[in-house]
Amino acid sequence: MSAKKTETSKAIEAAPSEEKKAAPKKPAARKTAAAAEKKPAVRKPRKTAAPAEEPVVEAAAHVPAEEPVAEAPAPVEEKPAVEEAAPAVPAAEEELPQPRRSVAFIGSECYPFVKTGGLGDVMYALPKALVKQNCDVKVILPRYACIPLKYQEKMVYRGSFTMDLCSDGRAFFVGIMEYVWDGVVYDFIDNEEFFRAGNPYINLIDDIPRFCFFAKAALAALNFMNWIPDIIHCHDWQAALVPLYLRTLFANTPIGGAKTILTIHNLRFQGLYSLPTIKYWTGLPHYLFTHEVLKQGYDDANMFKGGIAYCDLVTTVSNTYAREIQTVFYGENLDAHLRYHSAKLRGIVNGIDVEQWDSATDKLLPAPYDASDVVEKKKLNKRALQEQLGLEVDEGKMVLGLISRLTDQKGLDLVNAVLPQLVDGNTQVVVLGTGDAIYEDAFRKFENTYKGSVVAYIAYDEALAHRIYAASDALLVPSMFEPCGLTQLIAMRYGTVPIVRETGGLKDTVEPYNQYTNEGNGFTFDRYEAGLLLDAINRAKTLYFTERERWDEMVVRDMAKDVSWDNAAKQYRALYLELKP
Ligand code: ADP
Ligand code: GLC
């Protein structure tokens, strides 16, 4: 074993920490032998990597690779991390399902710190739901510079160390900043070089090194804090290297006994890049770069592929998507790999946070409502939205909402194809989204052409999203593929009828309206064709304008549907127990 290798293993074992004062109700996970060697806490100010202007190569120079990690300070405990709201833990411990399990979530975004889509919602809401299932949860995230100051200010320094990363042993600073909220502990991995950008995702050239760093640093941080969970639950490609590190470089460290779950939220993004680059940045052993694990094609490596091969279980966010990704059309070139690993692939449908999304208590709504007054209050919310956005103010109009990342995943070319046929004098369309210029421009053009009937609000705006969910009569989700989809769930919770394509989680969560039995939650179509979307919208319009009582019954039915995380959290807990009985 080379000297470099020895340094690496020192780095990843890192110094065990003092017991954390602000730990969640039940103290952390299992202790290991390493816990015995406690180090005195050393007060040390927050340390950052090299100044932001310097390139990454320079940054390494500031932290000598040879700096012995055993010298790294134990975490400082200047003050306990902030406990913001009342913990989500139910009062009586006996009521909780037994036994307790500890889980580290590792992912690239989490509401309210940083969110670009549904992954951010899941990383926030699922840990909270798991706390109610007697899980001790830590969420590990990058400390992006774009996290709002109000959260940055409340983070507490937990310690720092240096870690070897690349195949030539370059070392990097790893800081840990902590924040406790609602029974969940958030640990942010700090390194200004990697995470100073204003957006969690930049481009693959930058993202590959930063998420190699993040995956390894997350494990090293768990060792450093001596928080050894039963399960490490990784999310999407940005965390997909974790199982590979765990079973190789970290195998003989305290964290090495943890089991891993990798959840696929979106298979389109995989961390696919040139093999030599990924090999260099990860510093992973040569034998992982085969077609069975990381290698793809002639000279590429695929981080998601490697994670799928090396984790203990793969989950995705609906049963239908779990089946779809094993086919050529949806498999994004990994269908054969997923078929090969199908025995460890499961689908669990997402939920939404029903406290965050509650039309009765939603402070962002002009007129909050519940199922008893939804019909009247929706009109008030509609008028308010029409006024705010410059639409013709008329509560008699049917408002179709669309809240989405504007990318080709979301079926926007179908919407563009049918939009002129939707504007019939009785219908308004409200689009909220950002993304590809081609869609942004197309929607702006429609707004211009159909002033007063179509609005394209090209922005990311949480508050406006709430108002649109509440004010719309129906929400369009005609996606080409949709692993789960949260907007249709939020819509139903707000009494807004979803119009969806039957794919992925949309198929699993929206039961098509049956005019004979007067059952169902929304309107659906199957093949990816504009004519079928138009037909589904026209069926919705017909019911809305000609049989309003039945429409209103569907609205109430949708509001009563269980879209909470309870069911999914129980299923995840069962998987955790399956891996660690
Ligand atoms: P995806 O993760 O593929 O973007 P989801 O349906 O799972 O799709 O989640 C989208 C989430 O992002 C929802 O919470 C939705 O309300 C939110 N969202 C999407 N676009 C916007 C936007 N422009 N402004 C505010 N919220 C948005
Ligand atoms: C992804 C998917 C979306 C899913 C979300 C959360 O972004 O595109 O369908 O709801 O992740 O799992």
Image (cartoon, grey):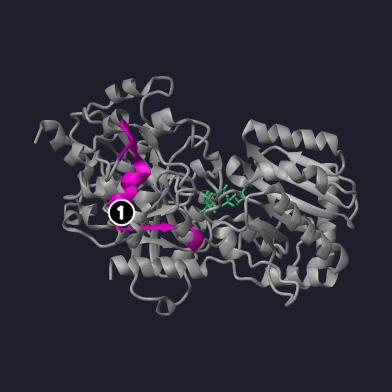
In the rendered image, residue 125, in percent from the top left (x then y), is placed at: 52, 58
> Residue at label 1?
311
Q: Quadrant of residue 577?
A: bottom left
Say whether residue 132 is visible: no
Left or right placement of residue 561 versus residue 535 in this view: left
Magenta stretch: includes residue 192? no
Return the residue nearer the eye: 577 or 32.
577
Determine the residue positioned at 55% across, 48% down.
Answer: 112
Left or right placement of residue 155 versus residue 425 in this view: left
Determine the residue positioned at 50% across, 61% down.
Answer: 320
Asked which secondary structure carries label 1, the reply is: loop
Determine the residue positioned at 52% across, 34% down.
Answer: 199
Q: Quadrant of residue 171?
A: top left
Relative vertical location of residue 230 with respect to residue 413 in this rendering, above or below: below
Relative vertical location of residue 570 with respect to residue 448 in this rendering, above or below: below
Looking at the image, the residue that sits furthest to the left is 1
Quadrant including the C terminus: bottom left
Say whether residue 268 is visible: yes
Quadrant including the N terminus: top left
Return the residue nearer the eye: 215 or 308.
308
Q: Quadrant of residue 34?
A: bottom left
**Amino acid type indicated by mark 1:** Cys
Q: Which residues are magenta?
A: 295-320
Determine the residue positioned at 84% across, 46% down.
Answer: 423
Beta carbon at label 1 within 8 Å of ligand 2: no
Return the residue nearer the eye: 434 or 96.
434
In the rendered image, residue 516, in percent from the top left (x then y), is placed at: 75, 76
Return the residue nearer the eye: 448 or 232.
448
In the rendered image, residue 397, in percent from the top left (x then y), is placed at: 87, 55
